[in-house]
Image (cartoon, rainbow, N blue to C red):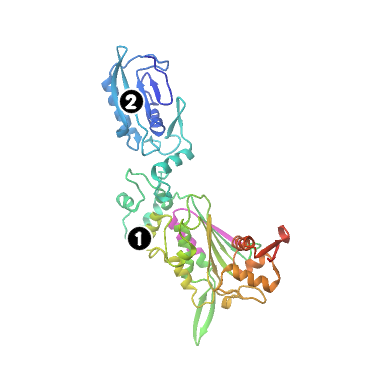
Amino acid sequence: MKYEESPILELKEIINTDFKKEIVALANTDGGEILVGVARDGTVTGVEHPESEMEKIGNMIRDGIKPDLTAYTSIEAVNTEGKTIIRVAVTRGLKRPYHLSDKGLKPSGVFVRHGVSSVPATDEFIREMIKESDGTVFDKMRSVNQDLTFDYASRYFAERNLAFDDAHKRTLGLMDEDGYYTNAALLLSDQCGHIIRCAVYDGVTKSTFKTRKEFSGSLLRQVDETYDFLTLNNGLRSGYDGLRRIDYADYPDAALREALLNAVVHRDYDYSGSIIINVYENRMEFISLGGLVKGLTLADIKGGASQPRNMIIANVFYRLELIESYGTGIQKIMESYAGSGMEPVFAPAPASFVVTLPNRNAVGAEQGTVSSDAVRFDPTLSQEDNVLRLLRAKGSITRKDVEGFLGCSAFPASNVLKRLVAEGKLIKVGAARSTRYELGS
């Protein structure tokens, strides 16, 4: 018999340093066989001490490759042409990607078959294999980065008298059954790659910038430091009830807290972008990546329905008493504005979710007034109906008019206008900076 290498057959005259790499590559691709004692040209050279060599291969598989591949491999001695060779059969594994224990889940440790060669897998292919094995729920998947530290999270748990050892990390879903850190662990680790960006503007548009700040590290650290920053930018209006002084914050503390936690817990971490928080003179915007979870509507979440996108993160925040229960955040935000004559605005889009908190102390904001000389914002009506009322009063409007009237930024204002144009209720006139909108027929 003449042996010839193929995508599923590897020939090895002796066991060398690349042997584990070949096993990993076959397990990550379509499986196959490795024949020891056969030269690259197909010549059978044989193995002198097959028993000791088979033991060596078994130790390599058990100690040098993760996750455990023992159940997906077999090792046997075969007689051919009067000589003994070793046949190592490898089945495509169910817990891909398999990797060299000392290299980890990175290209230097993960290999796949490409033709008759075993080559390093790309970062993208490693992520695809993880999705295939673990599913597509981000926080439950194995983290590509396994070199994680938890200095901030450990202190956070300790301050609340909660255990944070490996056993509890498994219980929380931060480690899987094979001992790998999940993406939820990555988000809570000091190595978390997502950040929160905050910007403060002078006025109601982005034309005049005052300051900006970025917060990184563990999500727990980001929440703490971002909340402190927002609190510093939450102004107070002072008044008196008789001799008693009363301080009235621009934004209800509960609204700031819940809007921030909502953005962190429910964002889609498959996107690499940042959470954006913009602070204007008359409003504060929280822009989180990822629209509503499939099946939920804005009416559902306003009514208290909840389906966390990141169940593990939501559960950790619940145990740390950062959130009281699922589905109450939006309701708390709305309740915090009760009696103010103003309402927060929730604007879901296919790839984002924007929460806009109106400044209760902004000039002209009392009793729901946002702008316009003749028309006041009516919180009982939809954004679209409010814009139509403004247009009937003014005759024509621009996007800037809508921004000021609704108390929002360009993105949600543009969405409202696009919907009205699509419905034929508005007509777009002009282009670029001269664009204005008039009533449709």
The segment highlighted magenta reads 210-229
> For the residue marked with disc 2, what is the amino acid?
Val
Where is residue 316 shown, x and y percent of the image? 37, 57
Callout 2 secondary element: strand
- Report the residue at 39% width, 52% height from top: 151
Q: Which of marks 1 and 2 is nearer the N terminus?
A: 2
| 431 is higher (above) or lower (below) than 243 | above
Residue 125: where, in percent of width, then height?
47, 38
Marks 1 and 2, Cα distance to the nearest angstrom? 48 Å
Residues at discs 1 and 2 in contact (Cβ within 8 Å)? no
Figure quadrant of residue 382:
bottom right
Decide if residue 281 is in sight here.
no
Q: From what the image shows, is residue 68 above or below residue 78?
A: below
Q: Nearer the viewer, residue 65 or 138?
A: 138
Give the number of the mark in front: 1 or 2: 2
Kindly identify which numbered label has been placed on residue 319: 1
In this view of the protein, which residue sits in the foreground, 439 or 199? 439
Residue 285's place in the image compared with 7, above or below, is: below
Relative placement, left or right, of 105 versus 423 is: left
Where is the N terminus found, in terms of image quarters? Answer: top left
Residue, disc 2: 88
**In x, y percent, where is residue 12?**
38, 20
